[in-house]
């Protein structure tokens, strides 16, 4: 497999993971941390770090909005137990 195909497949898998997490609002971050060792916030921090490695400025809140599909404060108000 060539490098570009690998990157495209990884990007597709990431998009599917984010989509799945947006749909599964019943699953709390604490549940994810306990079972998988990472949560939506971890994913958003990894996303921000990857952006910064490429010279792109991004705040934690901007990265969280990408992962959560809405501002984090809104997601917390709607779904966090």
Image: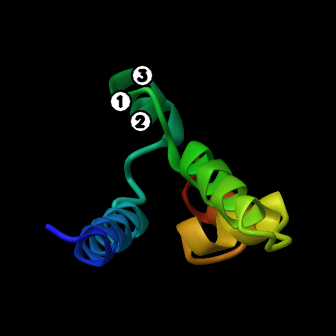
Instruction: For label 2, count other residues whose C-alpha is less than 10 Å away and answer few (under 14), some (14-19) or many (20+).
Output: few
Mark 3 vs mark 1, CA separation in Å: 6 Å
Q: Secondary structure at mark 2?
A: helix
- Mark on residue 36? 1
Residue 67 visible somewhere in the drawing = yes
Is 73 situated above or below 26? below
Q: Secondary structure at mark 1?
A: helix
Q: Nearer the viewer, mark 2 or mark 1?
A: 1
x 82%, y 69%: residue? 58
In this rendering, would 46 be left or right of 35? right
Q: Which residue is mark 3?
A: 34
- Mark on residue 70? none
Q: Write down the quadrant of residue 36 in the picture.
A: top left
Instruction: For label 3, count other residues whose C-alpha is less than 10 Å away and answer few (under 14), some (14-19) or many (20+).
Output: few
x 34%, y 60%: residue? 24
- Mark on residue 32? 2
Whether the residues at callouts 2 and 1 have beta carbons within 8 Å, the answer is: yes
Whether the residues at callouts 3 and 2 have beta carbons within 8 Å, the answer is: yes
The spot of residue 37 in percent (x, y) is 44, 26
Q: Nearer the viewer, residue 79 or 44?
A: 44
The spot of residue 69 in percent (x, y) is 56, 76
- For this orientation, the residue located farthest to the top is 34
């Amino acid at each position: 497999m060539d490098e570009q195909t690998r990157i495209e497949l990884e990007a597709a898998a990431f998009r599917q993971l984010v989509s799945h997490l947006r749909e599964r609002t019943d699953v709390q971050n604490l549940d994810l941390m306990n079972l998988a060792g990472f949560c939506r916030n971890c994913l958003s921090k990894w996303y921000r770090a990857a952006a910064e490695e490429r010279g792109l400025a991004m705040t934690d809140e901007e990265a969280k909005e990408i992962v959560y599909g809405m501002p984090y404060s809104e997601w917390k108000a709607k779904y966090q137990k």
